[in-house]
């Protein structure tokens, strides 16, 4: 009979293989751990800033009959004023004097001249104010200037004519007539 074959490495080989196995498991676990930490930094959702909420204290309870009556009176007064304004506008049609844009002379050294967008010239200040209010309601900054023969409603003043033309286009897009003047 043959004696049992002897294993190579024996006990020391087994320890060596076991340590190598534990080392490989450690490397695998640590690589997963590093991947987890990196993924946590990348994939964590961005913290949102909380919305600011404003609380307004509203009066509790029903309004008093006197307050309701006063509100109704104020609303009636406003309706009457609006009706009077409509009648006045119909009776006194605004007179628009649209001046043609003069040829721009070259300014002298000390003078500043501007291209101005003029929305209208009126003989009545009330009509000029009405147009200015409509322009302001449409989002345009307006200026009213007293002239010798009336009131000018002006929308802007610019160094460059191209800027004035751009504003004039915006005005016409919203239904307003305008002229560019040079002063």
Image (cartoon, rainbow, N blue to C red):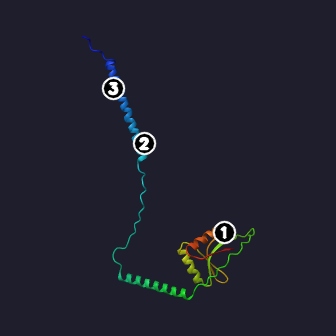
Residue at (35, 28) in percent of width and height: 21
Compare marks 2 and 3 and give the one earlier in the sequence: 3
| Callout 2 secondary element | helix
Height in image: 58 above or below 92? above
| Callout 3 secondary element | helix
Q: Tag 3: Cα neighbours inside 10 Å, few (<14), some, or many (≥20)?
A: few
Q: Quadrant of the N terminus?
A: top left
Compare marks 1 and 2 and give the one earlier in the sequence: 2
Height in image: 60 above or below 66? above
Residue at (35, 26) in percent of width and height: 19
Q: Foreground residue, 152 or 58?
A: 152
Q: What residue occupies the far right of the structure in this picture?
A: 108
Q: Tag 1: Cα neighbours inside 10 Å, few (<14), some, or many (≥20)?
A: some
Query: Mark number for residue 38?
Result: 2
| Callout 1 secondary element | helix
Q: Which residue is mark 1?
A: 161
Q: Quadrant of residue 153?
A: bottom right
């Amino acid at each position: 009979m043959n004696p049992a074959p002897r294993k190579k490495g024996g006990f020391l080989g087994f320890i060596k293989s076991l340590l190598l196995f534990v080392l490989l498991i450690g490397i695998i676990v640590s690589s997963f751990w590093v991947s987890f930490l990196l993924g946590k930094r990348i994939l964590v959702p961005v913290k949102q800033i909380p919305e600011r909420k404003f609380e307004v204290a509203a009066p509790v309870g029903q309004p008093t009959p006197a307050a309701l009556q006063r509100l109704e009176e104020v609303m009636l007064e406003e309706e009457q004023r609006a009706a009077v304004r409509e009648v006045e506008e119909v009776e006194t049609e605004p007179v628009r004097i649209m001046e043609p844009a003069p040829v721009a002379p070259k300014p002298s050294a000390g003078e500043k001249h501007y291209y101005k967008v003029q929305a209208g010239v009126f003989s009545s200040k009330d009509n000029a104010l009405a147009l200015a209010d409509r322009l302001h309601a449409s989002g345009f900054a307006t200026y009213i200037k007293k002239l010798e023969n009336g009131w000018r409603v002006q929308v802007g003043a610019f160094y460059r004519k191209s800027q004035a033309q751009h504003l004039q286009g915006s005005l016409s897009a919203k239904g307003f007539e305008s002229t560019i003047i040079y002063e």
